[in-house]
Image (cartoon, rainbow, N blue to C red):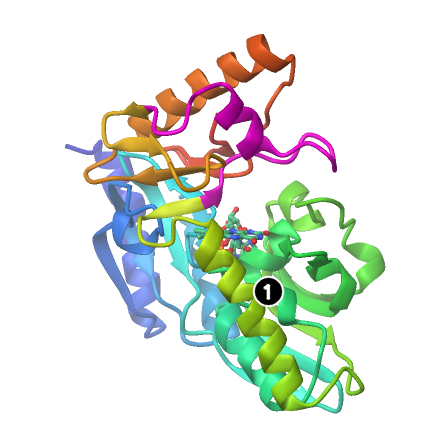
């Protein structure tokens, strides 16, 4: 049972969403929106179709006094077993992709798979590194996602954001983004919601076949190294230094295959925790705690989590 004051907030939000024709559903299991396949129900999950609807959804949640969480593809998130007493703002429908010369612009919900394929099909190079990262444009900019020597910051040209502190929409330039390793201004300013982003690509980086060939080469490396057959949220920990490989430290500590409930350290890549079936968020956090303790005592290295945990009250922090 939810307290009456909370139910009133939900009713106020529902009235606002219905009045504006914005689609939503109640009690959506967040396991269905996370690559980990973990997470209890979100009280309200909205599915805006346009940037205007997305902005309005966020502002309606705020004026109803409810916390909101903007969800990309849920590939870097650990959703809580207890779910979320707030508004999950889903972005998948904002998936448009446009090209203007060498500049590709994509909605925040466009998947990196589609975006990188669109760039390649247009003969534009620079986005190959992101082929195979199972995230959205919003999540990728938020995280400054990167792989195989490339990162979003290298190609980022600008973005439009909703500033939910005052409801305005404005443009951010690369200089505004404060990009660093797996970090951007969006992580520091949670009131900013990315609506769309532009990327500056290279028309002289090879033929369509050469660009596609590079992408497929990187995908083969992922298939060879990563446990893509089991649900996960990718690398659990940030790299402590450019020359320190977390997977190797964990493997050297004999933790490959270590488990807590349904969560296990991948036997294929020890930097990943996989859901072997029925894992809970508590299982994952327990395993993270054990790994951190062992790596600190065996190697004197303090690990920091890359994956993020959403608490039922809407607080979002590194998962351990
Ligand atoms: C198998 C596997 C392999 C992976 N490989 C890599 C890799 O090589 N490199 C890498 O960097 N990552 C990798 N990841 C992690 C993950 O895919 C990336 O971090 C990705 O960029 C997250 O995007 P997402 O859309 O899933 O974001 P989510 O997990 O949904 O969200 C992550 C954060 O971004 C915020 N966010 C999402 N959209 C917006 C928006 N529109 N506005 C504001 N904030 C927003 C969320 O609120 C949340 O705080 C991997 C994950 C898996 C499962």
In front: 213, or 65? 213
Q: Is residue 305 visible?
A: no
Instruction: Please rate how many residues cluster around mark 1, counting C-alpha atoms within 10 Å: few if below 14, some from 14 to 19, many from 20.
Output: many
Up the image or down, 288 lies above or below 201; here it is: above
Q: Residue 42: percent from the left, percent from the top?
A: 28, 46
Q: Residue at x 73, y 35 (%)?
A: 243
Q: Residue at x 74, y 85 (%)?
A: 206
Q: Is residue 48 visible?
A: yes
Q: Residue 221: percent from the left, percent from the top?
A: 53, 59
In front: 233, or 143? 233
- Callout 1 secondary element: helix
In front: 162, or 149? 149
Give the position of the N terminus as an image quadrant. top left
Residue 105: quadrant of the picture: bottom right
- Dominant secondary structure, magenta: loop
Up the image or down, 256 lies above or below 98; here it is: above
In the rendered view, does 32 fall on the left or right side of 307?
A: left
Mark 1 close to ligand 1, CB under 8 Å = yes
Asked if residue 157 is among those painted magenta in the image, a careful observer would answer no
Outermost residue toward the left?
1
Q: Residue 77: percent from the left, percent from the top?
A: 43, 44
Q: Residue 236: percent from the left, percent from the top?
A: 49, 36
Outermost residue toward the right?
175
Q: Give the residues in magenta.
A: 234-258
Residue 248: quadrant of the picture: top right
Q: Residue at x 74, y 66 (%)?
A: 156
Q: Which residue is mark 1?
A: 130
Q: Residue at x 66, y 71 (%)?
A: 127
């Amino acid at each position: 049972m939810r307290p009456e004051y909370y139910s009133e907030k939900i009713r106020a939000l529902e009235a606002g969403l219905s009045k504006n024709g914005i689609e939503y559903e109640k009690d959506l299991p967040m396991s269905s929106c996370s690559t980990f396949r973990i997470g209890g129900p979100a009280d309200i999950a909205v599915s805006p179709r346009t940037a205007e609807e997305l902005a309005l959804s966020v502002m309606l949640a705020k004026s109803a006094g409810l916390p909101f969480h903007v969800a990309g593809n849920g590939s870097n998130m650990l959703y809580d077993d207890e779910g979320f007493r707030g508004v999950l703002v889903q972005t998948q429908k904002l998936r448009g992709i446009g090209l203007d010369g060498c500049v590709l612009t994509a909605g925040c919900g466009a998947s990196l798979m589609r975006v990188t394929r669109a760039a390649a099909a247009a003969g534009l190079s620079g986005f190959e590194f992101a082929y195979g990262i199972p995230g959205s444009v919003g999540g990728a900019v938020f995280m400054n996602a990167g792989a195989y020597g490339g990162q979003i910051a290298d190609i980022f040209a600008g973005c439009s954001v909703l500033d939910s502190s005052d409801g305005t929409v404005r443009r951010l330039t690369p200089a505004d983004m404060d990009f660093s390793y797996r970090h951007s201004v969006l992580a520091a300013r949670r009131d900013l919601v990315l609506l769309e982003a532009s990327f500056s690509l290279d028309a002289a980086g090879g033929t369509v076949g050469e660009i596609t060939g590079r992408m497929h080469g990187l995908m083969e490396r992922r298939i060879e190294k990563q446990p893509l057959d089991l649900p996960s949220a990718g690398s659990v920990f940030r790299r402590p230094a450019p020359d320190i490989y977390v997977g190797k430290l964990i493997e050297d500590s004999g933790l490959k295959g270590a488990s807590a409930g349904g969560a296990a350290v991948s036997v294929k890549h020890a930097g990943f925790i996989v859901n072997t079936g029925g894992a809970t968020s508590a299982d994952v956090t327990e395993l993270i705690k054990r790994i951190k303790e062992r790596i600190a005592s065996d190697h004197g290295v303090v690990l920091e989590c890359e994956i993020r945990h959403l608490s039922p009250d809407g607080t979002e922090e590194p998962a351990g």
